[in-house]
Amino acid sequence: MAIMRIAVIGAGAMGSLFGSRLAAVAPVVLVNHRKAHSDAINAEGLVVEGLDGSRRVHRLAAVSDPQTLSGPFDLAIIFTKSGQTRAAAATADRLLAPAGVALSLQNGLGNREVLAEVLGAGRALVGVTAQGATLVGPGCVRHAGDGPTWIARLGPDDRVAAAVCSLFNAAGIQTELADDPDRLVWGKLIVNVGINALAALLRVPNGVLAAEPACERLMAQAVAEAVAVAHARGIDLPYPDPLAHVRAVCRRTAENRASMLQDVLRGAPTEVAVINGAIVRLASEVGLAVPCNTFLTTLIAALEATAAFRCS
Ligand code: NAD
């Protein structure tokens, strides 16, 4: 499959970063509801602040209203927050060629299932990425972390996932193929379960969570509950000691502000429903008690709901 045209749907921080790279090897359009971001990119280009402090301007097209776009596209990369995946999938359905595919690299559980419902399972690719990005302002993103990206094959002979993987590597996004989508998604989910809600509630960068014993006790309980749910569902996690893995991620990203912390600080909805909330939902299906994840999910929901009344 030759990738001819790519639409990045939900081109905020991560979508803009990936779009800027991919534009070097294929025609890319960034689709983003934030009109100010799209307008700035069309007028001045997309500025990407690199990990080394460099600033590069990338010329590529952006739209805020996908109705103004005409297809067909071969690949739609879905990079909205998980709450908007269904709307993004509907846009992908309209823009994609009949053989075109969508790829979710979002966090949280359930994005692949939503894409499969809307587009068909054979057109719904999923992956995870250790890349990180922050939206600095309209038309400007900061590359906040580097790391590999994985894409799950749809089956042993999946040439589409292989073509997307090659394209990403050609664009300088280090990417590998994997066989088991659940292993990929749960591997990342457990990390987010251990870090995100705690970082958002305590308002601390990731490194603090692994350095303070009281934080670590909460992290250990949230992770243990999630691992129990994963095991009950027969998920084969990609690392032998999940808590040690989460701690290692905290240390490696010590200065980072988790995305849920960033959401809470700017008063935006969080993805707790598809992270700790997903553990709560799935635990009830298999009869497991997950008190720590239940508490964290409820506390984040309460934090979001009371943002306007916060005392300083
Ligand atoms: P973001 O909020 O910066 O970007 C999402 C963008 O989607 C927003 O600009 C919003 O306007 C746009 N949008 C919402 N609904 C839309 C729709 N229907 N059509 C078009 N655009 C729409 O979010 P982000 O930080 O880039 O994260 C995106 C996803 O990637 C999340 O699932 C997140 O958990 C995951 N992720 C983020 C990072 C990171 O470092 N930021 C790292 C790994 C994974």
Image (cartoon, rainbow, N blue to C red):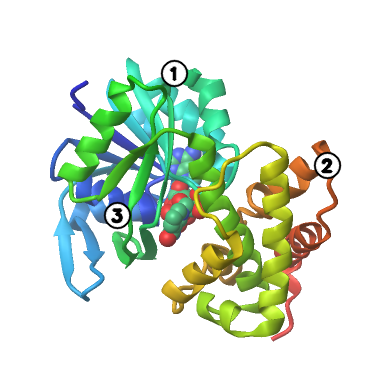
1 left or right, relative to 260:
left
Residue bearing mark 1:
122
- The amino acid beneath tag 3 is Leu
Mark 3 surroundings: few (<14), some (14-19) or many (≥20) residues within 10 A: many
Percent position of residue 60, x then y:
19, 46
Residue bearing mark 2:
284
| Earlier residue among tags 3 and 1 | 3
For the point 19% across and 55% down, which residue is it? 45
Look at the picture and state if 147 lies above or below 5. Answer: below
Mark 2 surroundings: few (<14), some (14-19) or many (≥20) residues within 10 A: few
Label 2 and label 1: CA atoms lie apart by 30 Å
- The amino acid beneath tag 1 is Gly
Percent position of residue 63, x then y:
32, 41
- Asked whether the beta carbons under mark 2 and mark 1 sit within 8 Å of each other, the answer is no
Q: Nearer the viewer, residue 191 or 96?
A: 191
For the point 68% across and 49% down, which residue is it? 273
Mark 1 surroundings: few (<14), some (14-19) or many (≥20) residues within 10 A: some
**Residue that sits furthest to the top in the current view:** 98
Q: Nearer the viewer, residue 192 or 35?
A: 192
Q: Nearer the viewer, residue 54 or 46?
A: 54
Asked whether mark 2 and ligand 1 are closer than 8 Å, the reply comes as no
Image quadrant containing the C terminus: bottom right
183 left or right, relative to 170:
right
Depth-wise, is mark 3 or mark 2 nearer the camera? 2
Residue bearing mark 3:
17
| Earlier residue among tags 3 and 2 | 3
Secondary structure beneath disc 2? helix
Circle number at residue 305? none
Look at the picture and state if 276 lies above or below 97. Answer: below
- Please indicate, yes or no, whether residue 23 appears anywhere in the rendered image: no
